[in-house]
Image (cartoon, helix red, strand yellow):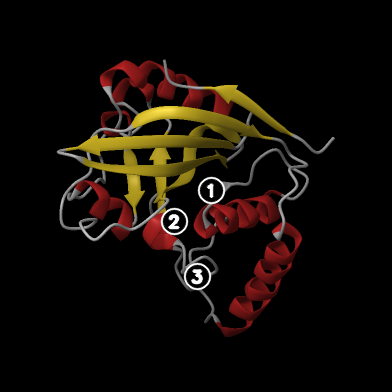
Amino acid sequence: MKQVVTKELFAYWNVQRGRRAAPERLDIDPGIIRGLLADTFILDHDAASGFPFRIAGSRTNMLVDKELRLTSFLELWQDSDRAQIASLLEATSDGPVPMLLGAGTSLNGRSLDLEALLLPLRHHGRTHSRLMGALVPLETPDWLGLIAIGKLELKSFRILQSAEKMQDLSIAQANYRNNALLHDRRAPHGTANAFKSTSAPHLTLLEGGR
């Protein structure tokens, strides 16, 4: 993982799942990850509708210059990659396993590399219900936010193992545990959760794209 957002979102997800393969959707508290929400999304596990967005953060919407809620996640990708992206989304839920994707886009001479994190969520025990993730550019050119990016091309993907070693994962997990305790003390009783209302250490590298 190259981006702070994907590292921290993965760390939070890892804390919330504990000894389980994946956390429940209702375990995700946006108050704890409020600094990541602009880059975070939640998808419906609905293959027939192209895995539509239930929630999309403002910076995710900014990438394509439109509101993504209820639109298909598959439509962000080149036609030739959509079947493979759908397979990766299914694998994320089937495992259930976290997945890291490398993507690129080029439009009118403008190119951009991004990384996408896909994380399985349970809903009342069901594994094929929701997916949480982030789509983050690796750099911020001056045109980003003014011009929509082109269709994404899948360049690589990685299945993140449960014992994945990250340089600062243990620190990030400890920080999120502390933040959760602080948030619980400050939050008034009955505070609504926006997500509730809607919706052996190694890294396996598998080739993506064509």
- Label 2 sits on a secondary structure element that is helix
- Label 1 sits on a secondary structure element that is helix
Task: Give the numbered dot on residue 147.
Answer: none
Residue 61 or residue 137, whichever sits in front = 137
Q: Earlier in the sequence, mark 1 or mark 2?
A: 1
Q: Position of residue 134 (x, y in %)?
A: 44, 48
Give the spatial CA distance, label 3 vs label 1: 14 Å
Q: Is residue 206 above or below residue 101?
A: above
Residue drawn at x 36%, y 36% is: 104
Q: Which residue is mark 2?
A: 195
Q: Is residue 131 above or below residue 207?
A: below
**Crowding near the residue tagged with mark 2, few <14, some 14–19, many ≥20 C-alpha atoms within 10 Å:** some
Residue 78 is drawn in which quadrant? top left
- Label 3 sits on a secondary structure element that is loop
Q: Which residue is mark 3?
A: 31
Q: Is residue 189 left or right of residue 110?
A: right
Q: Is residue 10 above or below residue 109?
A: below
Q: Position of residue 141 (x, y in %)?
A: 28, 57
Residue 31 or residue 114, whichever sits in front = 114
Residue drawn at x 29%, y 59% is: 58
Q: Is residue 107 left or right of residue 190?
A: left
Give the spatial CA distance, label 3 vs label 2: 10 Å
**Marks 1 and 2 in Cβ contact (< 8 Å):** yes
Query: What amino acid type should be assigned to the residue bearing mark 1?
Result: Arg
Query: What amino acid type should be assigned to the residue bearing mark 2?
Result: Phe
- Which mark lies nearer to you, 3 or 2? 3
Q: Which residue is mark 1?
A: 25
Residue drawn at x 74%, y 50% is: 18
Residue 181 visible: yes
Residue at the limit of the structure toward the right, as seen here? 200
